[in-house]
Amino acid sequence: MASISGVNVQRLVGLGQRRTPYISGSMTSDYGNNHYTFSPATRASFLQYLHDNPNNRRISEAERLNLIGWLTNPSAPSASQTESSRRNYVRKSFTWDKHSQTLISLGKKEGDKNRVVVTEDLILDVVERVHIDHGHPGWDTTWRAVHDSYYGILRADVIFLLKQCEICAQNPRKRPKGSTDLVPKSELANHDTSALMSTLSIEDLLYDPYSTSGVPRDDPYQGGRY
C-alpha cells in the first residue's frame, strides 16, 4: 500500500481515479448498502454549501493541476513577478509524487507530517472515510484525523457533514453537545443549506484546535491564495 512519510494515499488515489464514493472496497456508490454515512441528499447539499461558502484554503481541481504544472515544469517562464514568487513558494510547500500520482503538502518543520492535498470534489468522500474508519467519533476527533493526513479541508466542512451523518444521528450519545437533529431531507433535496448553516455558530466555523486565529498554524496560505 503506497504511503508518503506516513500518509496513506492509496484510498485517495482510488477516489481521484473514479470520482465516485469509493475507498478500498468498504464503501461503494450503492447508497442502498449499510456502509454509507452521507445520503445523496447530503451530497447535493454539500455541493451547494461549497458554492455558497468559498474559501481560499480549499483546492479546486484546476488549481491542483496548476500546482502540479509548476512543480513538474520549474523551468517554464512566469507570466509576472507575482507568479514567480508564488511558484517559488509552491516548490517549498508542495511536492508531486510520480509513483502515486499524488500532490503532497509538505510539513513546515521537523516532526510535521506531510499531507495529501484533497480537491473540493473529494472532500465529502475523504471525511466520510475517515469518520467511518474511526468509528463515527465527534467533531474534534474526526477533524484532527482529517487535518493530520489531508490538506484542503476546513473544520467547518467537517462539522457541516457530521451534522448530517445518519449513523451518528441514530445514536444521541454520539451527538455533540448543543447539536440539533438532522435537517429534514426535503430541505436538503431542495439544496437549502440555510437551515443547517444557522446551527453553526461563529465559534464552530472559525475555531481550529491548531490555531487561535482559525487558520491552521501550518497553513502556507495563511488565509490567502498561494
Image (tube, rainbow, N blue to C red):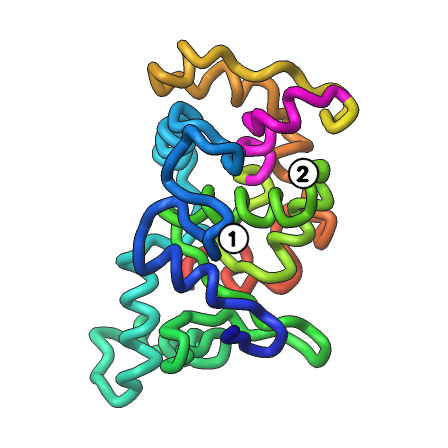
In the picture shown, does residue 63 fall above or below 38?
A: below
Q: Are marks 1 and 2 in contact (CB under 8 Å)?
A: no
Quick one: label 1, few (<14), some, or many (20+) residues within 10 Å?
Answer: few
| Residue hosting label 2 | 136
Question: Where residue 47 sits: x, y (%)?
Answer: 36, 34
Whether residue 82 is visible, yes or no, is: no
Quick one: label 2, few (<14), some, or many (20+) residues within 10 Å?
Answer: some
Instruction: Look at 49% across and 80% down and name the residue there.
Output: 92
Select label 1 or label 2 by which is in front: 2
Give the side of residue 144 with respect to residue 39, left or right: right
Residue 223 numbered mark, or none = 1
Q: Magenta residues, as a range?
A: 158-172
Determine the main secondary structure of the stretch shown in magenta: helix
Instruction: Look at 72% across and 77% down and name the residue there.
Output: 111
170 drawn magenta: yes
The residue nearer to you, when weighing 87 against 112, is 112
The residue nearer to you, when weighing 102 against 152, is 102
Give the side of residue 6 with respect to residue 64, left or right: right
Give the side of residue 178 with respect to residue 104, left or right: right
Give the side of residue 164 with respect to residue 145, left or right: left
Secondary structure of the residue carrying numbered label 1: loop
In the image, what residue type sits under mark 2? His
Gap between marks 1 and 2 measured at Cα: 29 Å
Instruction: Look at 49% across and 11% down and name the residue there.
Output: 184
In the image, what residue type sits under mark 1? Gly
